[in-house]
Image (cartoon, rainbow, N blue to C red):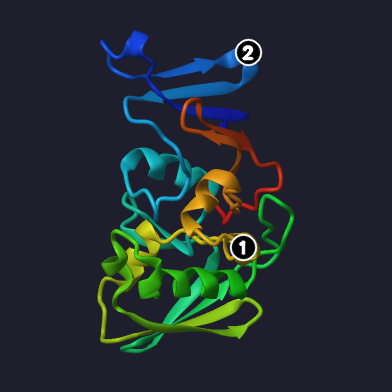
Amino acid sequence: MIKASVTIMACTAAVLMMNCAAHAQKSRDTLRIAFKDPISTTDSYSDPKPETSLSADAVFEKLITYLPAEKAFKPMLATSWKQVSPVVLELQLRKGVKFHDGAPFTADDVVHTINYLIDPKSRLRFGRNWEWIKSIEKTGSHSVRITSKRPTPFALARIATSTPIFPKHVHATFAKSGEFGRAKPVGTGPYRAEYVDPSKGVKLVRYEGYVSPGP
């Protein structure tokens, strides 16, 4: 069952002597998770640590996901994909998906995100994770083509594990992209961020408009 809200916060001084834990409030349909390290953003690109990834995975979605139990890649924001050549990967995107602010998800958001990741000016700590990508192009309102610099066996794994998609209409408005995950983290995931506060943590609330990628 998806909880109505989740609060992810740093442990206070009173509990630092104990292990941080998760506490449920069944009456309020709320789950509280505490960590020793502060969580000040939902952007795992600008702050690549496990605590940030926890909130990022709830707020944002990737194009595909990997299910270890099935040992298989499964659709998420992409409904299908095809390796049309050793260096070209084409993906068809899910239609009818909306961001938390109501804006529709399209190929423009995928192109924007990938171009942001491969732009040296972005100066991402782990920018080398996407160094293999040569370019991305929009081939339709809900389709894209990713061209790699060389045959890349781990391409799907990288897309599935560490490439959440950001909304172009919001992310592109920030002069300092790192502010996006704190000031206005808008995604397509099952939870939307009600607030992101270094002193209070991150409060996530169930997104009623969430479109599941399937069973």
Residue nearer the viewer, 91 or 80: 91
Which residue position is annotated with label 2? 27
* 115 relative to 29, above or below: below
Which residue position is annotated with label 1? 173
Residue nearer the viewer, 121 or 202: 121
Q: Earlier in the sequence, mark 2 or mark 1?
A: 2
As drawn, the residue found furthest toward the bottom would be 85
Quarter occupied by residue 19: top left
* 172 relative to 181, above or below: below
Residue 126 at what x, y percent from top left? 28, 61
* 143 relative to 97, above or below: below
* Residue kind at label 2, given as amino acid type: Ser
Tell me how many marks there are: 2
Could you tell whether 151 is left or right of 163 in the image?
left
Q: Quadrant location of the N terminus? A: top right
Q: Please report the residue visible at 50 percent of the width from the left and 58 percent of the height from the top.
A: 176
Could you tell whether 200 is left or right of 209 in the image?
left
Q: Which mark is residue 24?
A: none
2 or 1: mark nearer the eye:
1
* Residue kind at label 1, given as amino acid type: Thr
Q: Residues within 10 Å of mark 2 (few under 14, many from 20)?
A: few
* 90 relative to 72, above or below: below
Residue 113 at what x, y percent from top left? 50, 68
Quarter occupied by residue 134: bottom left
Q: Residues within 10 Å of mark 1 (few under 14, many from 20)?
A: few
Q: Please report the residue visible at 63 percent of the width from the left and 17 percent of the height from the top.
A: 28
Residue 166 at what x, y percent from top left? 54, 60
